[in-house]
């Protein structure tokens, strides 16, 4: 079954057909590194990660580029206020973003270009637009004339006609209600860092960066461009205008946009006290994998209501999955997989793939995973399973986890032996009435997130998430 994606450009679900049959080239709008990234942005980054991972699951090779915006109005203002250069100011937040990606298990794209390192490519793009008559200059800045591109508004539905009033706005932030000519190269202002150019000293406009970098690394036409729904207009609309205005070719075949989140039923804002960065939540003791599961549990095109009760439920769901994996890992009896287990696994696998092929329906895909957990646990309660059953079940679980990556399958496999050796040492200490050593081992394992349960049949252990 082919993957179907909702293409904002056509406003329809479409079969995904890449330009090259075995390779996908994808661009995702990355962070603007003026502060720590908030959870609304991470909802978008996680949906993009899920898409990337599922494309690999489907057998495609991926070339994925994500930009780092390290020059724009907020960055310049904040850096100047702190007496820092742009690079000194932004590196702190860029490094923090990479740390947050690691905490949330967001795979790093193959290419992560910084805007400040691609000024030449941006200037080449402006020159090409100038040659084709799409630009004009005003007070030291160079603008894109929207009326020169007759397909403007195709992505967002914004209507442009001869009666539209266009103004020139140098700021990087725009009002969605007022389509207007946009700045490509911003003339130099006092105390701002700037670059020499054929258009005068200045710096690039925000929209210019993504077009120049995506086309450098992915080509003039590529497969997928992702971002939050807030970027449809003006940012992505302007990307299309300047890219296609320069090349005369289609820029992107599939535009995929994720919806916003709200927090406890309200728009996230600092004034309401419900504005959270990932670091805010980690400082409160929340597990990053529970946050990853919650942020990926609702279809990417539906608004997600972020609640702390939802985080707790996600944490319990991961624990339920990890307890199940522990139970399956205890199966040692040799034998082939039974017909009933094979049917359960086949049904779960078919449900998982059908859901993901249906425009990344993550909620239905996760339901297939946890329905398998329920059915296998019920079967386990009534009969013994063997190694074939175990391998069949774990094979599905591991494959599904390559997409969601919230269960610690690989980590557990690497550390099991060490844990078992410590439990054996603890049991010997208890047998020798060396309770001090026994307690030391228990405490050490607890610090590593390992919970021990002593019973008549011996000591069991599980991971606490």
Image (cartoon, rainbow, N blue to C red):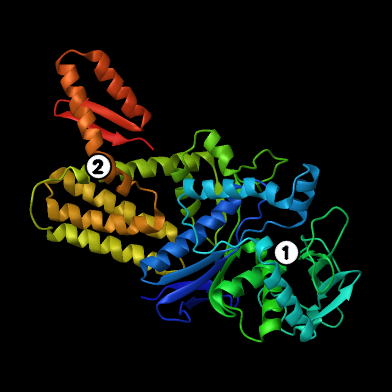
Task: Tell us which disc is closer to us: 2 or 1.
Answer: 1
Which one is earlier in the sequence, the residue at label 2 or at label 1?
1
Q: CA distance from mark 2 to mark 1?
A: 49 Å
In the rendered view, would you say 226 is above or below 330? below
Residue 341 at what x, y percent from top left? 17, 57
Residue at x-position 61% and y-position 42%: 276
Q: Quadrant of residue 258?
A: bottom right
Task: Point out the residue furthest to the front here.
Answer: 196
Q: Which residue is nearer to you in this view: 246 or 456?
A: 246
In the rendered view, would you say 327 is above or below 173? above
Residue at x-position 49% and y-position 57%: 108
Q: Secondary structure at mark 1?
A: helix
Q: Which residue is mark 1?
A: 206
Q: Secondary structure at mark 2?
A: helix
Residue 42 at what x, y percent from top left? 56, 52
Q: Is residue 153 visible?
A: no
Quarter of the picture holding the C terminus: top left
Residue at x-position 20% and y-position 62%: 343
Q: Which mark is residue 326?
A: 2
Tell how many labels: 2
Q: Which residue is nearer to you in this view: 463 or 315?
A: 463
Asked whether, in this view, residue 188 is left or right of residue 216, the answer is: right
> Quick one: label 1, few (<14), some, or many (20+) residues within 10 Å?
many
Asked whether, in this view, residue 286 is left or right of residue 261, the answer is: left
């Amino acid at each position: 079954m082919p993957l179907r994606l909702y293409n904002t450009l056509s406003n329809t679900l479409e079969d995904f057909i890449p330009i090259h049959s075995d390779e996908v080239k994808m661009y995702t709008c990355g962070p603007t590194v003026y502060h720590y990234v908030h959870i609304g942005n991470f909802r978008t980054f996680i949906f993009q990660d899920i898409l990337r991972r599922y494309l690999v699951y489907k057998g495609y090779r991926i070339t994925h580029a994500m930009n780092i915006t390290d020059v724009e109005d907020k960055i310049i203002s904040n850096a100047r206020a702190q007496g820092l250069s742009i690079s000194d100011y932004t590196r702190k937040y860029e490094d923090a973003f990479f740390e947050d990606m690691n905490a949330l298990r967001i795979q790093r794209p193959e290419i992560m270009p910084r805007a400040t390192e691609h000024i030449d490519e941006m200037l080449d793009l402006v020159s090409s637009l100038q040659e084709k008559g799409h630009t004009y200059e005003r007070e030291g800045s160079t603008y894109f004339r929207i009326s020169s591109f007759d397909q403007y508004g195709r992505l967002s539905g914004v209507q442009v006609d001869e009666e539209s009033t266009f103004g020139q706005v140098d700021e990087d932030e725009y009002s969605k209600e007022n389509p207007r000519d946009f700045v490509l190269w911003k003339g130099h202002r006092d105390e701002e860092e700037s670059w020499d150019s054929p258009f005068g000293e200045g710096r690039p406009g925000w929209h210019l960066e993504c077009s120049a970098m995506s086309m450098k690394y992915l080509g003039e036409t590529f497969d997928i461009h992702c971002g939050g729904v807030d970027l449809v207009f003006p940012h992505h609309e302007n990307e299309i205008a300047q890219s296609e205005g320069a090349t005369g070719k289609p820029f992107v075949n599939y535009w995929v946009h994720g919806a916003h989140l709200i927090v406890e039923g309200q728009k996230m804002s600092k004034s309401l006290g419900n504005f959270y960065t990932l670091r805010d939540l980690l400082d409160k003791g929340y597990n990053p994998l529970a946050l990853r599961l919650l942020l990926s549990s609702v279809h990417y095109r539906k608004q997600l209501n972020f609640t702390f009760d939802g985080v707790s439920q996600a944490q319990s769901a991961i624990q339920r999955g990890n307890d199940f994996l522990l139970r399956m890992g205890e199966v040692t009896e040799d034998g082939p997989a039974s017909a009933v287990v094979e049917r359960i696994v086949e049904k779960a696998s078919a449900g998982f793939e059908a859901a993901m092929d249906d425009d990344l329906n993550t909620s239905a895909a996760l339901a297939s995973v946890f329905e398998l957990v329920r059915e296998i646990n019920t079967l386990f309660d009534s009969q013994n399973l063997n190694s074939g059953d175990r391998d069949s079940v774990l094979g599905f679980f591991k494959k599904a986890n390559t997409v969601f990556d919230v269960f610690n399958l690989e980590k557990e496999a690497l550390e099991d032996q060490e844990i078992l050796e410590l439990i054996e040492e603890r049991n010997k200490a208890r047998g020798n009435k060396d309770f001090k050593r026994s307690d030391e081992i228990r405490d050490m394992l607890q610090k590593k997130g390992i919970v021990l349960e002593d019973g008549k049949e011996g000591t069991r252990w599980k991971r606490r998430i």
